[in-house]
Amino acid sequence: MKRERIHSAGPSITEAEVAAVTDAARNGWYSNFRDCLTAFEKEFCEYTGAKYAIATSSCTTALHLGAAALGLGEGDEVIVPDMTWIATVSALMYEGVKPVFVDIDPDSWTIDPDKIRAAITPRTKAIVPVDMYGHPSDYDAIRKICDEFGLILYADSAPAVGSLYKGKSTAMYADAACYSFQGAKMMATGEGGIFVTNNEELFKRAEFLVDDGRDESERTFWIKEIGFHYRMANLLAALGRAQLARIEELVEIKRNQYRMYHERLGSIPGIKMFLEKDGCRVNSAYPSMVLEGEFATDRDGLRKELRARKIDTRPTFPHVSAYPMFETVDSKVAKHIATNGINLPTPAYIDEEDADLICDNIKDILGV
Ligand SMILES: *Cc1c(COP(=O)(O)O)cnc(C)c1O
């Protein structure tokens, strides 16, 4: 074996990133204290096509910032998929919003638009679709429902930097969207996120809230309203810029990993690979598989045995409404994927030899 172990995830960091961060550590102070941040926000707008962006300390804080700026709060219901990372929901709940869970589509693992209408009530204010593991949500169908009922479309695109829906970034279909740069995501700043929108008024409101609710036009340090302290550090923006400059290369690395896994596992009955629907480019940030039929009995046993063989994987997220603070919804698809899904290893270094090792071990443990 070439390595101590195969990790479940990890970014591709080159000398370019090291040089960018070193430069910011040396020079990104005094009059330059925000240069990387401003440039990163501008470059992220250019990449996604969005008009405005605010880089934040995480995607969770970006999601919360947006929820506050959109005026979501006490008494509002927001429709979310019953499979996502908890941040989608906690960011809304920080503002007092009640999440309403809807099951997901069995192929894209994103919210099933056909099941949304039944969840709408007079209190519904927004739909927050999640581009799960980088698969774009069905934006055309969701937009249609939002327009029909006058709802806000607020996208949790945390894992979807580089994913495209009908050739455009997911941000272009939502009233606002958030992305993550956490260390295991498509591009990494360690911790970090970004809020994007094409709506100038919304941007201004978020821009006001992100810096503690200051109104410097009145006087220095004058706080007009209680806000947040959620801005990304300049040093991390330097890293973000260097990663963003390589984003198409990074997406290619992940899509190639998906190809390697699909070639080795895709035709085994009882293993269902996470797919890419027509009209979408999935960034393949998390190549995944679901155990079906006779294999759908012991996902955790398989993961444990792989770990013993020094191969780390991740289980798919539990379905959110199963957590103790919620009333559990019978989301059949989300439950099935939560119980039987595995994110295959996605560290940037995976090569054909690693893929052989990983897939041979999976096949050996499953007995195929
Ligand atoms: C990772 C993730 C988040 C949270 O991102 P952070 O940057 O870690 O706060 C939110 N939603 C989804 C769907 C995610 O995958």
Image (tube, rainbow, N blue to C red):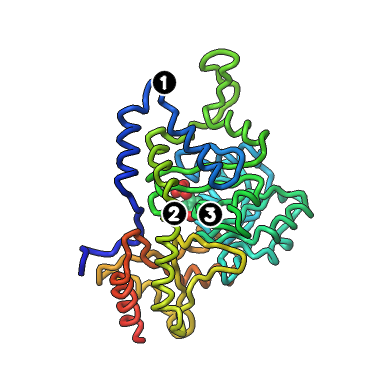
Within 10 Å of disc 1 (Cα), the crowding (few <14, some 14-19, many 20+) is few
**Mark 1–mark 2 contact, CB under 8 Å?**
no
Within 10 Å of disc 3 (Cα), the crowding (few <14, some 14-19, many 20+) is few
Q: Earlier in the sequence, mark 1 or mark 2?
A: 1
For mark 2, give the secondary structure.
loop
Q: Which mark is residue 31?
A: 1
Q: Within 8 Å of ligand 1, the CB of disc 3? A: no
Residue 279 position within the rendered picture, expressed as x and y whole percent measured from the top left = 62, 65
* Residue of label 2: 186
Q: Earlier in the sequence, mark 2 or mark 3?
A: 2
Quadrant in which the N terminus is drawn: bottom left
Q: Amino acid at mark 1?
A: Ser
Q: Nearer the viewer, residue 68 or 158?
A: 158
Residue 123 position within the rendered picture, expressed as x and y whole percent measured from the top left = 73, 49
* Relative height, residue 215 to residue 338 (above, below): above
Q: Nearer the viewer, residue 291 or 4?
A: 4
* Relative height, residue 34 to residue 183 (above, below): above
